[in-house]
Amino acid sequence: MNIHSIVAIALSVLFAAPPAFATGPAGRDRMHVGATARTPAAWTRFCKQYRDDCLVQPSAAATTVTLTPDRRQELDVVNRVFNRLIEPVSDLEQYGMVEVWNYAPNRKGDCEDYVLEKRRRLIELGWPAASLLITVVYDKKNSGHAVLTVVTDQGDLVLDNVNDDMLPWWNSGFTFLWRQSAADPNVWVDLERTIGRPELYTATARR
């Protein structure tokens, strides 16, 4: 049984709907997007191997998903299932290279591999690719990390391989560096090192 069959079975089980998310201060539930940034070299290499997964989708204009209870449940289940199915292994250990973005066919990978698997599965479930943005951050230890940002009508949500709970970006504790553009997955935009901590977020909103 492959990884996607397991996920499909998990999604068929009835789960209690996750609680609704709190909204960010001053209505700023979405991250501020700045100028165009340099595209990560690892993404460029990934696209050479998986060209179809890097194409601009016809539905690119549909960048915001209405987060119904069913949709919220799908996000929650996909996040939790892949966090358990994939064994964390560094690129150096698995490929002998420092930075490789790939899927996890052998159920091993690092943070980008979790993100790519979750993104692919959500697209299979009907989520628009334009709402599923690979995002590069500094984690709480100031180490480079990748998460999946999901753009919804309840704000930008973060799916992370080290946390089963979906979090609003502004309550994630991450420092946001850059992410894919919703209009084109091959264009990346600067997030201006915005810090996702509610006390700082609130202080900024009060200025």
Image: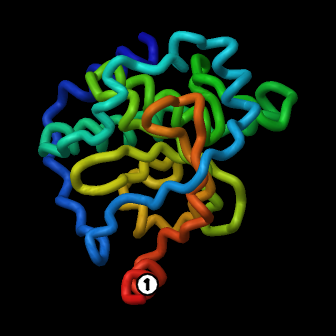
Q: Residue at x 32, y 63 (%)?
A: 29
200 left or right, relative to 21: right
Asked whether the viewer can see residue 121, the reply is yes
User: Residue 140 sits in which quadrant?
Assistant: bottom right
Q: Residue at x 55, y 56 (%)?
A: 34
Q: Residue at x 85, y 31 (%)?
A: 97
In depth, the one of 127 and 115 nearer the eye is 127
Kindly state the secondary structure of the residue where label 1 is placed.
helix
Residue 182, position as x, y percentages in the image: 44, 37
User: Residue 201 sits in which quadrant?
Assistant: bottom left
Q: Is residue 100 above or below residue 157?
A: above
Q: Amino acid at mark 1?
A: Glu
Residue 178, position as x, y percentages in the image: 60, 50
In depth, the one of 48 and 168 nearer the eye is 48
Q: Is residue 106 above or below residue 181?
A: above
- Per the image, the residue denoted by label 1 is 199
